[in-house]
Image (cartoon, rainbow, N blue to C red):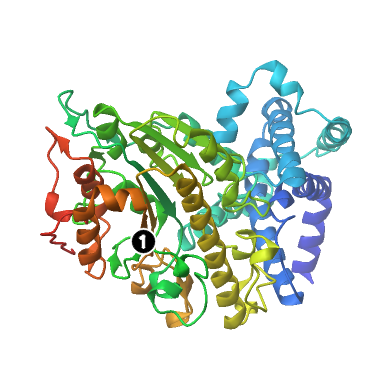
Amino acid sequence: MKIAEQIKKLFSKYKRQIYFHLLLNLITAISITYASYAHLPLNGFKDYSIYFIHFLLLQFSFFGVLYFVSLNKYVFYIVFPILFFVLSGLSFYVYTQDIVVSKYLIESIFQTSLLVSVELFSVNLIIFSLALIVLLYFIFKQYNKIGVSQLKSPLLILAILGLFTYNFIEDYRFNTFRSRMPFSAFHSLRMFFKNDDIKLLEVNKKVTSVKKEVTFIFILGESVRADNLQLNGYERETNPLLSKRKNILSFPNLYTPFTHTVPCVKQMLTSKSIKDDENLNEFYSLFSVLNQANYETFWIANSTLVSSYESIIKSNKNLMLIDKFRSIVSFNKALDDKMLQPFDSIYGIKKNQFIGLHMTGSHWWYENRYSDAFRKFKPVIDSKHIPSLKKEQIINSYDNTLVYLDNFINEVIKRVENKNTSAIVLYVSDHGEVLGEHGKWLHAQGLEESKNPAMILWYSDKFKNEYPEYVLNLKANAKKEITTDFLFHSILDFYNIQNFDYNKSQSIFTEETLFERE
């Protein structure tokens, strides 16, 4: 009885404070936190229950932040309105447009002129802003009624637990909270002011090339494993168009030790080897070498730039970002065929082009990576919660992304054919994907199944006639076990770069090719 009476007295003493924080968290949960969950595709009570718990834990960790902001009334009156309006404003666009609050959104906000900013206004935004003002007035009114020291309140312990919840969850599963509002805003702002760790080495000005009037088109894919390609003997028709083409080569034995995008990209597009320390951040950019040799480099990306390799991509002379405010975690991300229009605008305008196309590819959530016309295999996934799905559903959706990929590569090839130019189209995925092996799914888990990415090469008839020795060497190397180290050295060898040290024996265009794994 004494314990019950003490709890009753404690509740009576801190009742207004408890009511205030319940109200504050309810308002911020609706106006800010829930935005990251609004577009989640879920199916069934179990899925909704799990993500509801996820949402509550996220809000509980944000409660810790809000509580400490509210300890001092002057801090609360100044800091909270800024947090509330900025985070709610960002969440408005997450709600309405499914954008992702990233470093590039923050960058655009700082760099956008007032005239362009005005275009972001709408009637709904005005109504939303007026509602925020009313809510802020109500929050301040309730805050003034607390009347007790919050430093001595039992809620202080809960607030500390809330902060520790963030660290605990992030340590257990990286990016669980920080990729969602409000923490995605804090993280993105920090990344905006953070300097890139990469140091791109300066290329010798004497670098030259034996010019070839050949366009090299490189397509960087995402999460495509080699053994799910029809071209490599897969029983399903995942390459219905490319399998009927001539001048197509598939390299089924490509190896990378990396299983997530950042280290893959940093290694493939630079002089960095798979045998180097993963933390090595000093190397030559492939594009810097080509630029110095007076080639025109272009990069078109439907995959959001990541600060960990941003400087590498920006070393291209020309950069075009498609749908840059929606990342791979958005559920309304533009399809990769949106890159074809800018590709049409640049292909063939200059001789000696190197054009890169960076796809969103087969990254989870698969159903957002292709249009309805490519839903060949059914049933498909209907929930983001993988344990609720059948293996058949996941593999069907994944294979549908490969049918879409087949079409995308084919469309690029058709455009090259129409120009009747000497050209190479090379597709390489950054890594593979785990599809149920060892009870695991997706990638970034270090499993062997995600270390064999897909690689496809096509050459034009004109290229075949002009460089028959290259074609013979490509065919001879197609079935060899090669590593992703090949890319940097192959492209420099292809262009016959002079006065720059690269490993010709790692080139797929060379007869005496020797590839070494770790």
**Which picture quadrant has residue 492?**
top left
**Which picture quadrant has residue 96?**
top right
Q: Position of residue 467 (x, y in %)?
A: 23, 49
Q: Position of residue 360 (x, y in %)?
A: 52, 53
Please tell me whether residue 478 is drawn above or below residue 153 in the rendered image: below
Q: The residue tagged with tag 1: helix, strand or loop? A: loop
Q: How many marks?
A: 1
Give the residue number, with chain letter if any, for mark 1. Answer: 247
Q: Position of residue 101 (x, y in %)?
A: 61, 41
Residue 32 is left or right of residue 486, and the answer is: right
Q: Nearer the viewer, residue 52 or 247?
A: 247
Residue at 38% over, 65% down:
454
Residue 363 visible at all: no
Residue 311 is left or right of residue 192, and the answer is: left
Please tell me whether residue 350 is drawn above or below residue 261 in the rendered image: above
Q: Nearer the viewer, residue 304 or 15?
A: 304
Q: Position of residue 505 (x, y in %)?
A: 12, 54
Q: Amino acid at mark 1?
A: Asn
Residue at 74% over, 69% down:
48
Q: Residue furthest top?
A: 114
- Split into 4 quadrants, where in the image is the C terminus? bottom left
Residue 238 visible at all: yes
Residue at 23% over, 37% down:
284
The crowding category of the residue bearing disc 1, from other C-alpha atoms within 10 Å (few below 14, some 14 to 19, many at least 20), is some
Q: Nearer the viewer, residue 182 or 106?
A: 106
